[in-house]
Amino acid sequence: MKNIFTICLTVLLLISFQSMAQDEDEKYFFPDLQELEDFHSWQDLSWRVLDSKSLLVDAGVSKTYLFILQRDLPGLNSSNELEISSHGNRVRAGVDRVIILDQGAKASGIARIYEVPDRAARQDVIARILHAD
C-alpha cells in the first residue's frame, strides 16, 4: 500500500512539474514570428536584455532579432559586457552562444532566433516576455 502511494505521489509531482515548465517555456515561443536558423551580421551588434533567457539583438537598420537561450543565464540583466559568438559573420541557433564577459565568462547557447520585422512586433515581444508572470 505504501509503495502504491509513493508511486502515485511521484507521478503527480512529475506531471505538475512538467506543466509548470511547459507554462514557463510558452512565453519563449513565437509562432507569429519567423524562426531563423541563422543570420548574417556585417556590423557590430547591440542588444536589449529582456530577462535571463532572452534578448533583442539589433544588427543594423531595421534588422532586429529575438534570441531565446538554451538555459537561464543569471546575471544577464545586470551585465555590461556581453559577447555573441559567430562564425564567418553568421550567427547560428544551436551553434553560437551568448557570453557574459564581466561575470566569469558564463555562457548559454542560442536555442532559437526569431526575426522581429517591425516596431509593433518588437513591442509585442517585450510585453509577452516581461509580463508573462
Image (cartoon, rainbow, N blue to C red):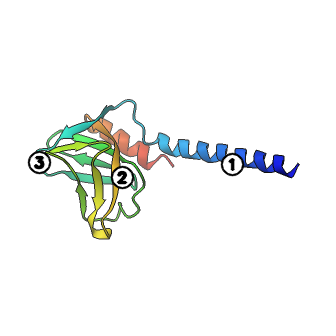
Q: Is residue 52 above or below residue 112?
A: below
Residue 50, labelled with which disc? 2
The amino acid on which the numbered mark 3 sits, given as a three-letter code, is: Gln
Q: CA distance from mark 1 to mark 2?
A: 30 Å
Indicate the secondary structure of the residue bearing disc 3. Answer: loop
Percent across and percent down for residue 30 are 39, 35
Residue 31, label in figure: none
Residue 106: give x, y in percent of width and height.
Answer: 34, 63
Where residue 16 sits in the image (x, y, percent)?
A: 65, 45
**Near-viewer residue (132 or 76):** 76
From the viewer's perspective, is the residue at label 2 or at label 3 nearer? 3
Q: Earlier in the sequence, mark 2 or mark 3?
A: 3
Q: Amino acid at mark 1?
A: Leu
Report crowding for label 1: few under 14, some 14 to 19, many 20 or more residues within 10 A (C-alpha): few
Residue under the point 29% across and 47% down: 56
Which residue corresponds to mark 3? 43
- Which kind of residue does numbered mark 2 sit on? Leu
Image spot of residue 86 (x, y percent): 20, 49
Q: Disc 1 designates what residue?
A: 13
The reply to whether callout 1 and callout 2 are in contact (CB within 8 Å) is: no
Of residues 84 and 75, the one nearer the viewer is 84
Label 3, label 1: how far apart the Cα atoms are:
48 Å
Question: Image check: 82 left or right of 73?
Answer: left
Crowdedness of circle 3 by 10 Å Cα count: few (<14), some, many (20+)? few
Residue beneath the point at 24% across and 38% down: 38
